[in-house]
Amino acid sequence: MSDAVTMDKIVSLCKRRGFIFQSSEIYGGLASCWDYGPVGVEFKRNVKNAWWRSMVETRDDVVGLDCSIMMHPMVWKASGHIESFSDPLVECKSCHMRWRADQLEKQACPSCGGELTAPRNFNLMFKTFMGAVEDDAAVVYLRPETAQGIFVNFENVVTTSRKRLPLGIAQIGKSFRNEITPGNFTFRTREFEQMEMEFFVKPGTDEDWFRYWAGERYKWYISLGMRAENLRMREHAKDELAHYAKACVDVEYLFPIGWSELEGIANRADYDLKQHSTWSGKDLSYFDTQDNERYLPYVIEPSAGADRSALAFLADSYTEEDVEGATRTVLKLHPALAPVKVAVLPLSKNERLAPFAKEVHAKLRQCFATDYDDTQSIGRRYRRQDEIGTPFCVTIDFESLDDNQVTIRDRDSLAQIRLPVENLVDTLKTKLAGEAFGTDSLWAGARA
Ligand SMILES: [Zn+2]
């Protein structure tokens, strides 16, 4: 399947249907910056909500947090970001293009073949100035990860949530990295949204928890309909590990650009709390009342990207099918992720049909994210709903006015059923919870 899906096709559908636009497009765009359109913003929010639901809402041992993007500069000294969050940068002496030295196969400019400068460390943090005076004292950074906000709030959260360890703290938010070579649509961007959770545990139990979270995170993608053959786990070799990590495993997805990281699960040991204890002078150790001992907790971190997950779900659900000699493009998104769950489509824009159709729409929108569309031919409207991944279309025809029945069309199997309008809400609720008409539905049986 994925060999037929190219990044170009995804980019084109995203633009055509209002998922993702280039930032500042009327001014020629800004490199690697993207805007989520009316359909995309709902879709991406659904991805984040699914993560939050699985990581926070349905668990007793995880709580949420929302930290500011700008933090005290000392945070980044303690975390090691000012010292070592950098990539080796080389510049072409002829065309002045910049490259990451560790990504080059040859010692010449990939663009023009020119000679390259010696590598220098290029810090990836965005810097800005806080307050009216642009001097060094006022330098602040845009956070390059949401994790540090969690570490520096560890004590606040433990005290106020009245929870015992093991305890996770989850956060979704924007992070910024001045990548030397961003690209591949929303795969690598300089501004991106992370979904991170830091799980604090007693030292000695960390390896079990590491394996547990690696398994949970893999299952999350599967539970939302991602194909197992497009997912794999890759354990980092010892020489690949970040200096703070004891172990790390990536969830990789087979993107149209090849196998690439979707999420990393790291065992950060006590590195972060130790660093912040040292630099802040505050003791961040935890007193375990159950075991009657004091220790610095170890941390397991599942760190996922909201944009990257969204892109993977798009690529995975993108399907081209031959239907009666024509190509049908359809996003077979899991209903939980679909931006619109049900579209109400009167057969034609007719004044006799409209009141009935609008009444049906008013009833449905109380329960589901809905769309109402009465322009263009029914075929074109179906095509639009298929391309934004709407699981069900409800059509209303002239017969509906007499028998009070409507037709539901299943996106994946294209099967249709006719039923009394009073059964519509309950039927759709059941269908959206996992039961589709056909057998080729992606989400049939996906919910374990
Ligand atoms: Zn060059």
Image: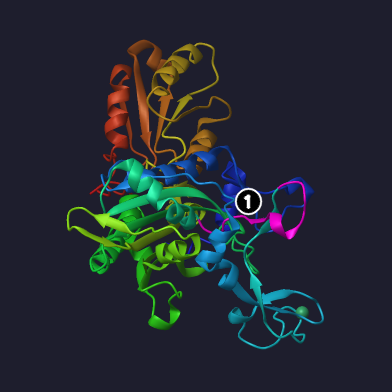
Which colouring convention does the figure follow?
rainbow
Please state which of residues 3 and 111 is positioned toward the viewer in this rendering: 111
Q: Magenta stretch?
A: 131-145
Q: Is residue 216 left or right of residue 185?
A: left
Name the residue that disc number 1 marks.
34
Q: Residue furthest front?
A: 281
- Do we see residue 91 in this rendering? yes
Rendering coords of residue 135 (x, y %): 76, 57
Q: Residue at x 41, y 62 (%)?
A: 273
Rendering coords of residue 78 (x, y %): 52, 65
Rendering coords of residue 413 (x, y %): 34, 43
Asked if residue 132 lies in the magenta stretch, the reply is yes
Rendering coords of residue 324 (x, y %): 44, 46
Asked if residue 267 lies in the magenta stretch, the reply is no
Magenta span: helix, strand or loop, mainly?
loop
Which residue type carries mark 1?
Answer: Trp
Q: Residue at x 82, y 81 (%)?
A: 94
Ligand 1 is within 8 Å of the C-beta of the residue at disc 1: no
Q: How many marks?
A: 1
Q: Residue at x 28, y 21 (%)?
A: 423
Please state which of residues 94 and 178 is positioned toward the viewer in this rendering: 178
Please state which of residues 113 and 126 is positioned toward the viewer in this rendering: 126
In the picture shown, does residue 404 fall above or below 174? above
Please state which of residues 178 and 276 is positioned toward the viewer in this rendering: 276
Q: Is residue 248 left or right of residue 328?
A: left
In the picture shown, does residue 227 fall above or below 419? below
Say which quadrant the N terminus sits in. bottom left
**Mark 1 closeness class: few <14, some 14–19, many ≥20 residues within 10 Å:** some
Q: Splitting the image into four quadrants, where does ligand 1 fall?
A: bottom right
Q: Quadrant of residue 75?
A: bottom right
In the picture shown, does residue 200 fall above or below 57? below
Q: Quadrant of residue 91?
A: bottom right
